[in-house]
Image (tube, helix red, strand yellow):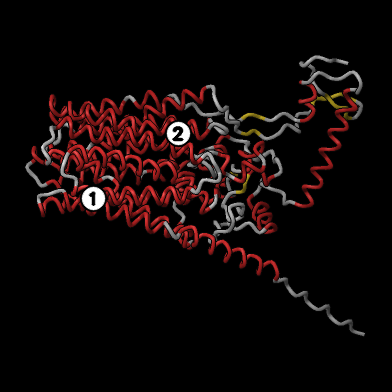
Amino acid sequence: MANNKSVELKQMKNGEIVEDDADDGPPHIVPPDGGWGWVVMIASFFCNIIVDGIIFSFGLVVTNLAESFEVPVSTVSWVASLLAGFYLLAGPFVSSLATRFGFRLVACAGSVVAGLSFAVASLAMSVEFLYVFIGVLGGIGMGLVYVPAVVAVGFYFEKRRALATGIAVCGSGIGTFVLAPFTTWLLGYYGWRGTLLIHGGLVLNCAIFGAMFRPLEPAKKKSVRRQLADEEVSAGTPLMVRIKKERDEKLRSDERQETTQTDHFHSSTNSLNNTVKLVGIKSKRSSTLTDSSASLGKKETPLLAAGGSKRSLANQDDVRPLNRDDAFYTGSLQRLPQYRENPASYHASVTRIPDAVDEADGGKKSSRCMRAVSSLIQFSLFKSATFDLLCFSSFITFLGFFVPFMFLAARAEQLGADKESASFLLSIIGVTNTVGRVVCGALSDHPKVNVLFVNNAALTLGGVVTIATPFFPAYEMLIVYACLFGLSIACFASLRSILMVELLGLENLTNAFGLCLMFTGVSATVGGPLASMFFDATNDYDASFYLSGSMILISGILCYPLGYINRWEKRRNNAAQHNKQKVKPVPEPEPLAVA
């Protein structure tokens, strides 16, 4: 008997010993929780520094553009607002491209698009030219970099996901801290044209970092027999006896699964559709929200439900970002019931298998991309009162979110501060934003922390201090405001995905996140010009901060009843499900026998 690890397992068949690899498990992604993942995390960190740093400090360029083109601030503010708006609006579409082409290619393409757009915009002779090349193309390019940078980190980490994503997104605050004074220095030495050109060069560096988003290859799980071959075989039990015993147990397990589960993913679409009918899986997402464990409303079936089907992850397309329910989740996995119940099979339970239409499409990339977009923007989720209120609150938040970034420095200059001191206020927001993300990340690691309350308190604080800004007569008080505002937006940004999971369930995170990105992109586009219109009318920034603070405060107030509404909705849906289960079809009477 061979007792080394290189021995090949074979079985008896018709009197001959033949190799059998048929029982090898399905390929699946295994997050390394380290290794190259740390490189991906650092690359994502620098992408966030560049992208968010430029976006949050672009308000410093607005006043220079208004003076250069001799137009009102409200006219030029559309450039910064379109940049922020398309940066968010591009999210669902960027996710679909990343699903089809991978993180690396999309991030590199976005870097080139944004970099060239900024470079061309430095030659602009009109504000309308800047609308297109900075606002639209620049915003889309930034979104192409940002989404892969955030999602890629989660693919490389499982147990350390909260730590890794927390470090990566801290690049946003660090970028604001560094690029705000740097942009002021560039404007003083090179003017706005040179500043845009250098910003374009900075964004091009994201292509280098994006190239580090190396895709994870699915690993094929060994069969029981191959695991035995890789182990030292004990002298007490003959090898073939152990193989036969393990195979018999596996066959009995398979037979039990076949009697209780449907046969998933046959080679033909018709057989798959018939199977779906047997288990009651709907072809569309469920329009009602049940407890977070309910996931039959999926268009795609969880891998774990397939009972280890060899089809589960047989090709690379099945392990794309949107095929995972937790693609946008940045918190600790300890908060997820799916992870706490069975950490070993967690990533199988949140990975979904493409539906029959995807199978029929084969290599049609355009069809796959459109279906990936549709998975992010399915409007059936609006049937949930919880989501409606959460989405509307996010919309209101972003009406005022970017206003302080655009006008706080100008407000400080009105109080007599020089340009360097004024831009330093944005750096303070960046520092406290970083600290706030770290603190909120640490708090969210504890399942008992009420993240909804933390989110509501942060929005309320941010709104109140922004409304009070016009009453701060000195630069030193604006420093206090910058600290408090940075902390408040950090909590809001870092807890968004965690809050969606707790209220809507992990199975609805992708759809909810995509819809919220769309609506917040619209409000971010409108908020800046709306606030600048008040400045043009009053020649003072007080009204702009009143508007911004009011929007943020209202969004926080709207979120306070979310917990009660969510519990009521779950009770209602559970009662409806219970009533459906109690209703049983009445059997048809047997025909009377004719004598």
Residue 146: percent from left, percent from top: 38, 36
Residue situated furthest bottom in the rendering: 595
Tell me if residue 179 comes above or below residue 265 in the rendering. Answer: above
Residue with the mark numbered 2: 166
Q: Does residue 451 appear left or right of residue 540 in this picture?
A: right
Secondary structure of residue under mark 2: helix
Residue 229 placed where, x, y %? 79, 22
Between the C-alphas of marks 1 and 2, the distance is 31 Å
* Residue that lies at the very extreme toward the left in this rendered image: 70
**Residue beneath the point at 91% across and 23% down:** 237
Q: Residue at x 17, y 36 (%)?
A: 61
Left or right: residue 231 compared with residue 365: right
Q: Is residue 1 left or right of residue 150?
A: right
Which dot, 1 or 2, sits closer to the camera? Answer: 1
**Vertical placement of 33 versus 272: above or below?**
above
Kindly indicate whether the residue at mark 2 contacts the one at mark 1 (C-beta within 8 angstroms).
Answer: no
Q: Earlier in the sequence, mark 1 or mark 2?
A: 2
Q: Callout 1, which amino acid?
A: Ala
Query: Tag 1, which secondary structure?
Result: helix
Residue 371 appears anywhere in the view: no
> Nearest the camera: 352 or 14?
352
Q: Residue 399 in the image: x percent, y percent?
A: 29, 52
At a point 87% along the width and 23% down the height, the residue shown is 239
- Residue 591, given in percent of the width and then of the height, sits at 83, 80
Q: Is 68 or 291 nearer to us in this picture?
A: 291
Q: Which residue is mark 1?
A: 468
The quarter of the picture where the C terminus appears is bottom right
Q: Residues within 10 Å of mark 2 (few under 14, many from 20)?
A: many
Q: Can the viewer see residue 591 in this picture?
A: yes
Quadrant housing the N terminus: top right
